[in-house]
Amino acid sequence: MTWHLLDEDIRAYASRTLTAPGLWSTEAHLAACGACRERLAVTATAGPGSAVDGGWARLDAALDAPRPGPVERVMIAVGVPDHTARLLAATPALRLSWLVAIAVTAVSTATVAMFTDPLVFLAVAPLLPLVAVAVSFAPGIDPTHEIAVVAPIRSFRLLLLRCLAVLAATTALSAVASLFIYEYGLRATGWFLPSLALTLLSLLLSTRLGAAAAAVVVGVGWATVVAATFGERLVFTVAGQVGAVLVGAVAAVALSRQRGTYDRHHVPTLMRRIP
């Protein structure tokens, strides 16, 4: 080569600040000039902010990044953003152990109901989402609770996202369990509308009582109603299903009006505990 790159051009190329058309001629020259490639290597490796150091840092970050689990991969595959999928995947009630426990409970209850009374399954199935919701966002139960409430996402939105994911999982498992009492006809799906209504009520009360306490209160109330109307099976008649829809609708409207309450009650409480 009869000429070589200027020092300032090599430094600009190493720092990625060299622009076209000088960038193009520099790259063409480097492809043919070993001496300038050696100068570039020396420049690129000089100092803690070099391109090589930056490349190693990016490589380390990629290698150390946690690998998504099966639940997270499924959510990403259906279009859930990466950061949202990561927060949802940390939900205790979406872990494989919890899903297996819910599935076993649903199937066992349906099996008992098949030999005794379908009301057993219809009464228990709506309680499964309540347990999952309590586990999903209750301090002391959810190991990621404190991280979640200070994440760059509204706590109430995260609560809704987690509850939606949990409700979808438990609904699917309960729907499969309903096949065990198929002889009961369409009434075998009578747990679905009460399940939605109870979940919405639990969410509404969680803004005041907390997720775990709200689930307990709603669960006890549900058990009382079912026990009081056991003979008439009122909750699982057409009138009872309409009543469940109305209760759920009222709870949904009230919840939408109080969507800021959860953040005001929970984030300040957490921040007071941080030294």
Image (cartoon, helix red, strand yellow):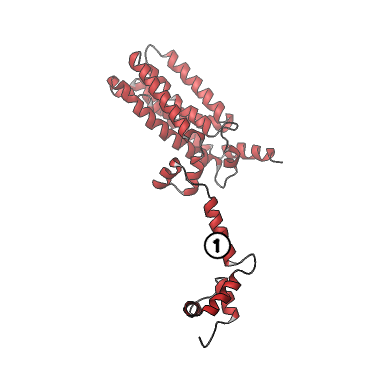
Residue 31 sits above or below residue 99 on the image: below
Q: Residue furthest top?
A: 231
| Crowding near the residue tagged with mark 1, few <14, some 14–19, many ≥20 C-alpha atoms within 10 Å | few
Q: Residue furthest bottom?
A: 2
Picture coordinates of residue 5 (x, y %)?
55, 82
Picture coordinates of residue 92 (x, y %)?
51, 34
Answer yes or no: is residue 247 visible. Answer: no
Residue 78 sits above or below residue 100 on the image: below
Say whether residue 74 is left or right of residue 26.
Answer: left
Picture coordinates of residue 122 (x, y %)?
38, 21
Q: Residue 270 sits in which quadrant?
A: top right
Q: Residue furthest right?
A: 275
Quarter of the rendering occupied by the C terminus = top right
Residue at the image position 41 percent from the left and 34 percent from the top: 169
Residue at the image position 55 percent from the left and 79 percent from the top: 35
Residue at the image position 37 percent from the left and 25 percent from the top: 242
Q: Residue 154 sits in which quadrant?
A: top right
Secondary structure, mark 1, is helix
What amino acid type is highlighted by mark number 1? Gly
Residue 252 sits above or below residue 110 on the image: below
Picture coordinates of residue 272 (x, y %)?
69, 39
Q: Residue 263 sits in which quadrant?
A: top right
Please give the residue where the numbered disc 1 appears in the rendered image: 55
